Image (cartoon, helix red, strand yellow):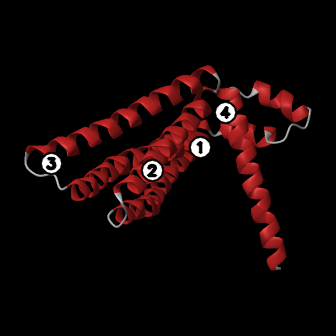
């Protein structure tokens, strides 16, 4: 009985952690929408498409973490495949990885891509000097395109993640392992 209470307490801590983590991540992503107000519309469009891609990518990783099984990674780890041990950790913590990737990063990117689409449409309207019904039509069209790219990208990512979670998780684990290695080397140099 004690173990269940401890696990429940751990889940509540994680929920509070996720809520607290959302604030700075959202602020960092939101900075890009502020930047969009001072750029040309085509640079803004590239940034918005980048945000859409990041959201779909992290949504895919979150889904792959939930769909992946440990067994292939144990086989890889026994052969000392780079990233396999980290992949096992990802799969064992699938609930947390999925929550961070899909719910925090993926959802924030989705919201900000909509805000970015509005900023891009305003910049485009200023450059073509549209007014009246054309003004509203351009805003609606750009927002609709960005929304369809977001939803379509996430749908494609989730489909790929469900059918091929192992290579996705292995790639994410290898990137995470490489970043961790670089960080450890930088910390050693400081000492």
Q: Which residue is mark 1?
A: 2
Question: Are the residues at dot 3 and dot 1 in contact (C-beta closer than 8 Å)?
Answer: no
Mark 4 closeness class: few <14, some 14–19, many ≥20 residues within 10 Å: many
Mark 2 closeness class: few <14, some 14–19, many ≥20 residues within 10 Å: few
Residue shown at 41%/65% (left/top)?
31
Q: Is residue 63 left or right of residue 39?
A: right
Mark 1 closeness class: few <14, some 14–19, many ≥20 residues within 10 Å: few
Mark closer to the observer (3, 4): 3
Mark drawn on residue 168: 4
Residue 178, image x, y percentages: 77, 52
Q: Is residue 153 left or right of residue 180?
A: left
Mark drawn on residue 53: none
Ranked by sequence position, the earlier of labels 3 and 1 is 1
Quadrant containing the C terminus in the rendered view: bottom right
Mark closer to the observer (1, 2): 2
Q: Is residue 103 left or right of residue 62?
A: left
SS for dot 1: helix
Pick the residue in front: 15 or 139. 139
Ranked by sequence position, the earlier of labels 3 and 4 is 3
Mark closer to the observer (1, 4): 4
SS for dot 3: helix
Ranked by sequence position, the earlier of labels 1 and 4 is 1
Disc 2 versus disc 4: distance between alpha carbons? 25 Å
Disc 3 versus disc 1: distance between alpha carbons? 62 Å
User: Is residue 176 among the parts visible in the rendering?
Assistant: yes
Ranked by sequence position, the earlier of labels 2 and 4 is 2
Ranked by sequence position, the earlier of labels 1 and 2 is 1
Question: Which image quarter: residue 180?
Answer: bottom right
Q: Which residue is mark 2?
A: 46
Residue 54, image x, y percentages: 51, 45
Q: Is residue 154 left or right of residue 130?
A: right
Q: Which residue is mark 3?
A: 135
């Amino acid at each position: 009985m004690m173990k269940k209470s401890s696990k429940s307490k751990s889940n509540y801590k994680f929920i509070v952690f996720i809520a607290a983590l959302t604030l700075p991540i959202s602020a960092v992503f939101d900075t890009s929408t502020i930047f969009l107000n001072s750029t040309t519309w085509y640079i803004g469009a590239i940034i918005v498409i980048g945000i859409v891609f990041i959201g779909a990518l992290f949504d895919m990783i979150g889904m792959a973490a939930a769909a992946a099984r440990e067994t292939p990674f144990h086989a890889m780890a026994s052969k000392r495949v780079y990233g396999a041990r980290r992949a096992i950790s990802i799969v064992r913590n699938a609930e947390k990885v999925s929550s961070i990737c899909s719910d925090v990063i993926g959802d924030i990117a989705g919201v900000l891509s909509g805000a970015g689409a509005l900023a891009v449409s305003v910049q485009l309207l200023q450059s073509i000097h549209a007014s009246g019904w054309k003004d509203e039509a351009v805003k609606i069209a750009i927002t609709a395109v960005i929304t369809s790219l977001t939803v379509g990208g996430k749908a494609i990512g989730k489909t790929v993640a469900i059918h091929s979670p192992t290579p996705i998780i292995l790639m994410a684990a290898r990137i995470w392992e490489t970043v961790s290695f670089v960080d450890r080397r930088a910390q050693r140099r400081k000492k």
